Amino acid sequence: MMQKLTLKKAFPYILIIGGIIGLICSFTLTYDTQQIALNPSYQPSCNLNPIISCGNIAKSAQGTIIGNIPNPWWGMMAFPVVITLGVVLLAGGTFKRWFWLAVQGGATLGVIAVHWFFYQSVYTLNELCPFCLGVWAVTIPLFWYTTLYNFDQGILKLPKDSWQKVAGFARQHHIDLLVLWILIIAALILKHFWYYYGHYF
C-alpha cells in the first residue's frame, strides 16, 4: 500500500526543485545584467514587447535593492543554499533550531523582497520580466512550505490556541491557500495590463 506523502518527506524535494528553478532564472538574469553592463544596447532574449522586457528592469534603480549589487546575484547566492539544504535533508541530515530560524528569516526576507519587486515592476516600471516571474513563482512556495515545516517540527511556537487553529487550517488547506495566493498576484497583473492583453481574451 502506498504511504501517505507527508510534508516532512516532501519538503526536501520542494527545496531541491524550487532551488534549481530559482538558480536557473537567477543565472539567466545575471548573464543578461552583465551583458547590459558591458553593452547598454544589448537586447536580452526576453525583451518580447513593451510589457515583457527584462532589459529595462535590469537597468532600473529597482534592479539593485542593496547598493550596487544586482538583484539576481542574491538569487545566485541563496538558491544553491536552498538546494544544498534539500539534499542534506534527503540524506537524513538534521539541524539545530537556530539554523531553522535563520532559514525561516531568509525565506521571509525573500518573500518580502519578491512582493516589493512585484509592486515596483507592475505599478512603477509597468513591465514584467519572465525570469523574475520564475523567481517569484518558486520563492513563494519555498517560504510557504518552510513556514509550515517549521510549525510542524516545533521550530516556530504558537502560544495561543487560536493561532494553533490557524496553523492547523493552513496545513490542512496548504495547496488551496498557495494557489489562491498565486492567483491573486496573477489577477493583479492581468488587471493592470488588461489594456494591452485584453484583446486576446
Image (cartoon, helix red, strand yellow):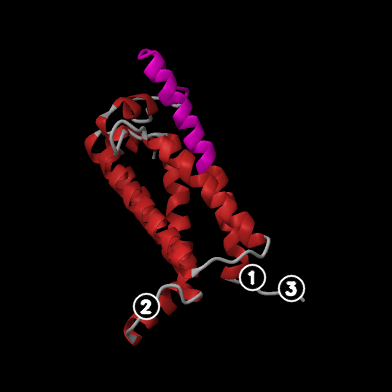
Q: Magenta-highlighted stretch: main secondary structure?
A: helix
Q: Residue furthest left?
A: 124
The residue sitting at 65% across, 60% down in the picture is 90
Comes first in the chain, label 2 or label 3: 3
Query: Mark 3 = which residue?
Result: 2
Percent from the top left, x then y, of residue 192?
27, 41
Residue 133 occupies quadrant:
top left
In the image, residue 78 sits, relative to residue 160, either above or below, namely above
**C-alpha span from label 3 to label 1:** 9 Å
Residue 81 in view: yes
Percent from the top left, x then y, of residue 182?
40, 54
Residue situated in front as seen by the camera: 137 or 11: 11
Residue situated in front as seen by the camera: 180 or 93: 93
Determine crowd level at label 3: few under 14, some 14-19, many 20+ residues with C-alpha closer than 10 A: few
Comes first in the chain, label 1 or label 2: 1
The residue sitting at 35% across, 53% down in the picture is 109
Q: Are marks 3 and 1 in contact (CB under 8 Å)?
A: no
In screen coordinates, is 70 left or right of 6?
A: left
Residue situated in front as seen by the camera: 7 or 95: 95
Residue 13 in the magenta stretch? The answer is no
Q: What numbered label is drawn on residue 166?
A: 2
Query: Mark 1 = which residue?
Result: 5
Percent from the top left, x then y, of residue 189?
32, 44
In screen coordinates, is 64 left or right of 146?
A: left
In screen coordinates, is 4 left or right of 154?
A: right
**C-alpha span from label 2 to label 3:** 29 Å
Residue 178 occupies quadrant:
bottom left
In the image, residue 8 sits, relative to residue 68, either above or below, namely below
